[in-house]
Image (spheres, rainbow, N blue to C red):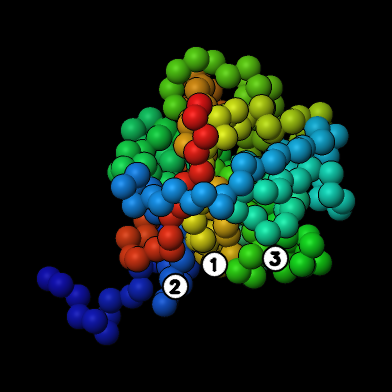
Amino acid sequence: AACSSKTRNAALHPLWQSPLTIPGGTRQSPINIQWRDSVYDPFLKPLKISYDPTTCLHIWNNGYSFLVEFDDSADKSIIVGGPLENQYRLKQFHFHWGAINDWGSEHTVDSKFYPAELHLVHWNAVDYPSFEDAVMEGNGLAVIGVFLKLGARHEGLQTLVDALPAVRHKDTVIEFDEFDPSCLIPSCPDYWTYAGSLTTPPLTESVTWIIKKKPIEVDEDQVNLNFTLLPQRCSEPVFHQQFSGKTQKLSVFSEIC
Ligand SMILES: NS(=O)(=O)c1ccc(C(=O)N2CCCN(Cc3ccccc3)CC2)cc1
Ligand SMILES: [Zn+2]
């Protein structure tokens, strides 16, 4: 029987037991990217990515995913241009994947899921003193999203996959250096961009999303990351909640490629 409004709780994120979306949120992520909704924006510039591999620090398994974290104490690994007003510093990257290959990405393109999605998280160190401060600000973060699809083996990703068994359990950290994550970003400059939010709690509306239009190809073994990781994760229900409300303008940058 339908539960009455007074007993129906706000939808809670099964992993974090926190609200799925911020009440009154106007720019929640992830979304379904519909080509037909995207507006070509002639004022968008190409995104400039310059990462210094020596800023790569370690891989950390936080129990929900694994993060590759970077030394963000200086402007050494940065992105600039694209929809961004100034430069943003790379803080970490992580993946979202599913238990099966039919889904796993958080964003979808014309309602199509990819088996996994890479997020490279950057923060606005020009306007804010720390990542934690930037997380709370509308222009605080810029996240590059890259879809992964099944195909050829990805040599650059393999160095990371080979290190994952060492962070099999929650809260393990291993040193990981000299890695340049730009090898995980497609060379085609085309991207969609919209004003959105973190896709995990606290879901703050502080992210300028830059979603690369072309996916990278990885092979079956590489995409089944979770068999090497987080046994407790497999038992956790991974929740994919998409925000279907009215979202911000979805702009597209494209060069002939
Ligand atoms: N999927 S995603 O949208 O790209 C994504 C990006 C960054 C994070 C991340 O690093 N987090 C989550 C939130 C911020 N906390 C610290 C905090 C700062 C202020 C108030 C509470 C918590 C750190 C962990 C997670 C997910
Ligand atoms: Zn993410």
Circle nearer the N terminus (3, 1):
3
Tell me, yes or no, whether the two marked residues, 2 and 1, touch with CB atoms within 8 Å: yes
Q: Position of residue 10 (x, y in %)?
A: 35, 73
The residue indicated by pointer 1 is 205
Relative to 191, does residue 176 appear above or below in the rendering? above
Ligand 1 resides in the quarter of the picture at bottom right
Q: Quadrant of residue 58?
A: top right
Percent x, y for residue 228?
A: 56, 28
- Residues at circles 3 and 2 in contact by the CB criterion of under 8 Å: no
Residue depicted at 44% across the width and 72% down the height: 25
Amino acid type at circle 3 is: Ala
Q: CA distance from mark 2 to mark 1?
A: 8 Å
Residue type, label 2: Gly
SS state under label 2: loop
Q: Which residue is mark 2?
A: 25
Q: Which residue corresponds to mark 3?
A: 134
Relative to 143, is 73 on the left or the right?
right
Q: Amino acid at mark 1?
A: Glu
Give the structural element (helix, strand or loop) at label 1.
loop
In three-dimensional space, the C-alpha distance between marks 3 and 1, rounded to whole angstroms, equals: 11 Å
Question: Tag 3: Cα neighbours inside 10 Å, few (<14), some, or many (≥20)?
Answer: many
Residue reaching furthest to the top: 152
Per the model, the C-alpha gap separating discs 3 and 2 is 18 Å
**Which badge, 3 or 2, is on the more N-terminal residue?**
2
